[in-house]
Image (cartoon, grey):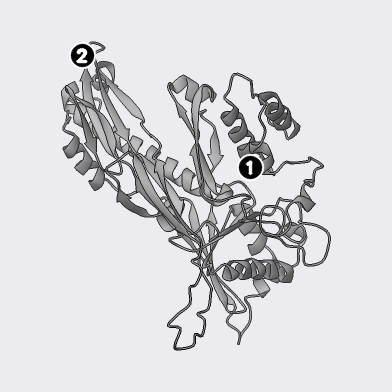
């Protein structure tokens, strides 16, 4: 069994890459910090024009665009797997029943398999963190102490990254039910969203949608007819399957705004054993590659009689537990994906209720535009929701639990911390409403 950490790190780097579409395309890997804290820097895109100045002045001050930096404590991801004597004595997968291989011959092979399985699970977690940022503007992380707690979603230490101030302004509601729109109306909605991003100084190049949205478009004869123009370059429908549940559908050209359409239909197995989609059904996200990056904190653990630290994206570890007659293989990672500009994308869902019934009512900023939030506090199904600021201002656990139950979230108890109750309520509200 290989136990030297540096050899295991090099082995991890040489394993076949795993395609994680959102993480690789929108939050690619960046530097690793020699600390448990990482530095993130965010800046809003500027569109200011330079002033004319009389020569004798030499120059006049110009207000800087919004910029801020922060130090975040990197979360701790640490799956582990055991190798038992019983496992080594069994025939390996694909091995001939007549094999004369000994248990020690299988040891390195099983160690490598476990390392690869855990590496893939860490990368799936990174993909989930990346999609959560797109959907909610942040990441809610539950740190568990045991596998039982993780499976039952109880007794956890809650931490949260939130990459926006005030309200999450990247959520858009269509002017009317997207499913009943004409092809012309759908194209106009796409153009309005692209125009909103252009006003923010961002040029969207990707439209990423779930399979139900994609099927709604490609089975609409009028939408396909939009591409059937002999002398007008309106885009192409050229469906190509990419690895890991991603398909490129072609391009769309809307008044000079050219975007590539992707169908994203990936799932993961959650800690409770249930299969769940990375993106909820009905999602459409307007993005551009490299809207952020993923930085990492260093990993520190005990080796022998001292602590050792490694500044790597994934750090494997293997050791023997002679007392319990098992070998353990473990992997650590401390990733922090974050956006450079917290307003550089827009996400919407075709199953959200329309913004309102007035003409030209498509809005950004959750339920409305940036200037007016309270007007649409009543959700389409009659549930009255509170803003994030109102939820965070609550000081009594009972009030948070009562509000959570009013929006359909059950299972919260006063045994939980106040911050945990608020975070769980916010996460449920963002997912459902």
Q: Which residue is mark 1?
A: 431
Residue 421 percent coordinates (x, y): 61, 29
Front one among 240 and 252: 252
| Left or right: where 207 falls relative to 112 | right
Relative placement, left or right, of 194 versus 360 is left
Frontmost residue, 210 versus 373: 373
Q: Residue at x 33, y 42 (%)?
A: 297
Quarter of the image with the N terminus is: top left
Q: What is the total number of numbered labels drawn onto the structure image?
A: 2
Residue 322: which disc?
2
The percent coordinates of residue 254 (x first, y second) are 62, 75
User: In front: mark 2 or mark 1?
Assistant: 1
Q: Residue at left 38%, top 43%? A: 335
Quarter holding residue 144:
top left
Q: Is residue 173 above or below residue 296?
A: below
Q: Is residue 95 visible?
A: no
């Amino acid at each position: 069994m290989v136990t030297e950490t540096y050899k295991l790190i090099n082995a991890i780097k040489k394993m076949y890459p795993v395609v994680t579409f959102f993480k690789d395309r929108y939050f690619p890997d960046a530097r690793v910090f020699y600390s448990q804290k990482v530095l993130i820097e965010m800046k809003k895109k500027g569109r200011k024009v330079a002033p004319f100045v009389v020569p004798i002045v030499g120059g006049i001050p110009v207000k800087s665009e919004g910029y801020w930096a922060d130090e975040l404590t990197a979360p701790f991801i640490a799956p582990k797997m055991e190798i038992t004597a019983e496992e080594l004595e069994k025939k390996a997968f694909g091995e001939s029943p007549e094999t004369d291989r000994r248990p020690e011959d299988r040891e390195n092979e099983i160690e490598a398999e476990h390392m690869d399985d855990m590496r893939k699970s860490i990368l799936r977690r990174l993909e989930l963190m990346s999609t959560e940022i797109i959907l909610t503007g942040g990441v809610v992380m539950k740190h568990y102490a045991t596998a039982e707690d993780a499976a039952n979603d109880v007794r956890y230490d809650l931490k949260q990254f939130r990459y926006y101030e005030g309200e999450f302004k990247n959520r858009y509601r269509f002017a009317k039910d997207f499913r009943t729109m004409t092809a012309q109306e759908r194209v106009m909605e796409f153009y309005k969203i692209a125009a909103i991003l252009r006003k923010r100084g961002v040029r969207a190049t990707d439209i990423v949608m779930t399979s139900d949205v994609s099927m709604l478009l490609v089975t609409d004869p009028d939408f396909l007819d939009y591409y059937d123009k002999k002398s007008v370059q309106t885009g192409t429908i050229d469906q190509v399957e990419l690895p890991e549940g991603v398909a490129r559908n072609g391009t769309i050209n809307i008044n000079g705004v050219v975007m590539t359409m992707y169908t994203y239909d990936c799932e993961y197995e959650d800690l409770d054993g249930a299969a769940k989609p990375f993106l909820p059904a009905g999602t459409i996200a307007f993005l551009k590659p490299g809207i952020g990056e993923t930085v990492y904190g260093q990993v520190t653990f005990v080796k022998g009689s001292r602590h050792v630290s490694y500044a790597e994206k994934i750090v494997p570890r293997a050791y023997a537990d002679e007392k319990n007659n098992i070998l353990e293989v473990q992997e650590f990672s401390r990733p922090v994906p974050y956006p450079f500009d917290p307003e550089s994308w827009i996400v919407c869902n075709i199953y959200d209720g329309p913004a309102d019934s007035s003409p030209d009512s498509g809005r950004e900023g959750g339920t409305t535009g940036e200037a007016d939030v309270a007007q649409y506090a009543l959700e389409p199904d009659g549930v009255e929701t509170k803003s994030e600021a109102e939820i965070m201002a609550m000081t009594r656990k009972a009030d948070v639990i009562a509000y959570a139950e009013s929006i359909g979230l059950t299972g919260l108890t006063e045994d939980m911390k106040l911050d945990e109750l608020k975070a769980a309520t916010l996460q449920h509200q963002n997912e459902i409403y």
